[in-house]
Image: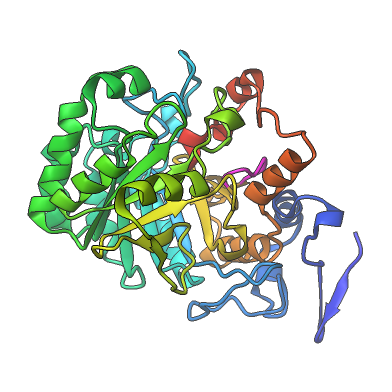
């Protein structure tokens, strides 16, 4: 491999798409180079590995600001849009990061600019003593926003502990207000438990409560306004999410997608004129306001991807780091952490991979649709070979 001169130090070139995957290149470089290499200030992107650095940019100028931390790949529901199959391969329990390891890696990310962390799964509440992890993470003053996404089944019994631990925000998945429809979608009972969990969060007064609804044509597209009205009653903003064809969504088809345009048209029939809220944000949701002042969001990942502003990455429960929900390759951070690699070396890897990031997975999927080639993202056989490819392992 050729070398690039930066200042007075010779360093390997930042990985580019033409040279292969940034993740694979960074991993192979790390294995071949001595520890002293990572101490050079001009290497791995031409900037020093400095705990005060907060603006690491990828090849499209997107900063590293948000981390989705999956604490488990297991789930107590089997939602058809996420886990439609009957059997799954799980991450081996012995490979899962301890809370101490999660905090150690999160600390490195925050030293490189991350200030928003979201706990995900699978279903994160299946991880025992999750409130302990929340307390541990919030000992890090660089974390300005700590949020949790849950299906709500176990939320009523754990919400008070989360609030006491200092959790800032809660998002609950709520795809329907109809118990029988809930059972048909999730292939489990428990709709009443989800509503009880939402009520518990509303009573405790977290910084914010959001409700996420995957809008599916012919299934729950008749409930959109009812969900907004329910959200008003519990003080929650509803976000409608277009059905996405990510890893694990083996039942996906374009005709099941209820698009942003369709959502707005349906809601305008009930409420009248809907206005967009103009705001600068890297969040995936586009926000709108109804005539009475009620706000809601739409995440149009399928028809209008937000790749251009995406500042998030994902850390799986066993320490694989992914730059995109659609990415095929991840970087193993558990290995070097458990091997005792210096923090600066791991940070240099993170920095290098992010600076070589070219991911825009949702946009690429949309481009395939335009030429009639948007089929299933990953087949079941491949998913069984590597559970990391599943959406429920990467935190959705």
Give the quadrant of the N terminus.
bottom right
Residue sitting nearer the eye, 95 or 320: 320
User: Would you say residue 103 is visible in this rendering?
Assistant: no
Name the residue at the left extreme: 203
Q: Which residues are magenta?
A: 325-330
Q: Whole-percent x and y of residue 178? A: 24, 26
Q: Is residue 128 left or right of residue 184?
A: left
Q: Nearer the viewer, residue 75 or 45?
A: 75
Up-down relation of residue 57 to residue 177 (above or below): below
Q: Position of residue 46 (x, y in %)?
A: 72, 78
Q: How is the image coloured?
A: rainbow
Q: Residue furthest top?
A: 86
Q: Residue at x 49, y 77 (%)?
A: 51
Report whether residue 129 is seen: yes
Answer left or right for 285 relative to 186: right
Q: Main secondary structure of the magenta part?
A: loop
The residue at 48%/81% (across/down) is 52
Residue 162: x percent and y percent?
Answer: 17, 51
């Amino acid at each position: 491999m050729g070398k690039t001169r930066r200042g007075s130090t010779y360093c390997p070139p930042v990985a580019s798409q033409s040279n292969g995957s940034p993740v694979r290149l960074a991993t192979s470089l790390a294995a071949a180079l001595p520890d002293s290499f990572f101490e050079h200030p001009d290497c791995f992107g031409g900037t020093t590995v400095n705990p005060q650095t907060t603006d690491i940019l990828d090849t499209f100028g997107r900063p590293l600001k948000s981390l989705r931390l999956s604490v488990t790949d297991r789930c107590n529901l089997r939602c058809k849009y996420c886990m439609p199959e009957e059997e799954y391969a799980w991450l081996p329990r012995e490979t899962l990061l301890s809370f101490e390891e999660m905090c150690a890696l999160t600390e490195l990310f925050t030293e490189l600019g991350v200030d928003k962390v979201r706990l995900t799964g699978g279903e994160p509440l299946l991880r025992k003593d999750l409130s302990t992890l929340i307390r541990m993470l919030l000992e890090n003053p660089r974390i300005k926003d700590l949020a949790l996404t849950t299906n709500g089944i176990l939320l009523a019994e754990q919400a008070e502990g989360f609030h006491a631990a200092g959790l800032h925000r809660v998002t609950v998945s709520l795809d329907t207000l109809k118990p029988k429809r809930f059972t048909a979608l999730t292939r489990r009972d428990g709709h009443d438990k989800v509503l009880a969990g939402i009520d518990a969060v509303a009573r405790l007064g977290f910084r914010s409560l959001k409700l996420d609804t995957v809008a599916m044509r012919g299934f729950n597209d008749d409930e959109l306004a009812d969900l907004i009205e329910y959200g008003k009653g519990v003080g929650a903003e509803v976000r409608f999410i277009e059905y996405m064809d990510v890893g694990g969504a083996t039942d996906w088809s374009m005709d099941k997608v209820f698009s942003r345009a369709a959502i707005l048209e349906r809601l305008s029939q009930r409420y009248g004129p809907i206005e967009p809220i103009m705001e600068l944000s890297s969040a995936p949701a586009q926000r709108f306001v109804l005539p009475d002042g009620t706000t809601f969001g739409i995440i149009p990942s399928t028809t209008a991807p937000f790749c251009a502003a995406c500042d998030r990455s994902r850390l799986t429960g066993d320490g694989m780091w992914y730059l995109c929900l659609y990415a095929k390759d991840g970087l193993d951070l558990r290995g070097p952490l458990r091997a005792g690699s210096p923090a600066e070396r791991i940070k240099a890897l993170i920095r290098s991979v992010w600076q070589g990031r070219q991911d825009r997975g949702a946009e690429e999927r949309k481009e395939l649709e335009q030429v009639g080639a948007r089929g299933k993202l990953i087949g079941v056989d491949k998913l069984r070979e590597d559970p990391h490819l599943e959406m429920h392992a990467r935190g959705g």
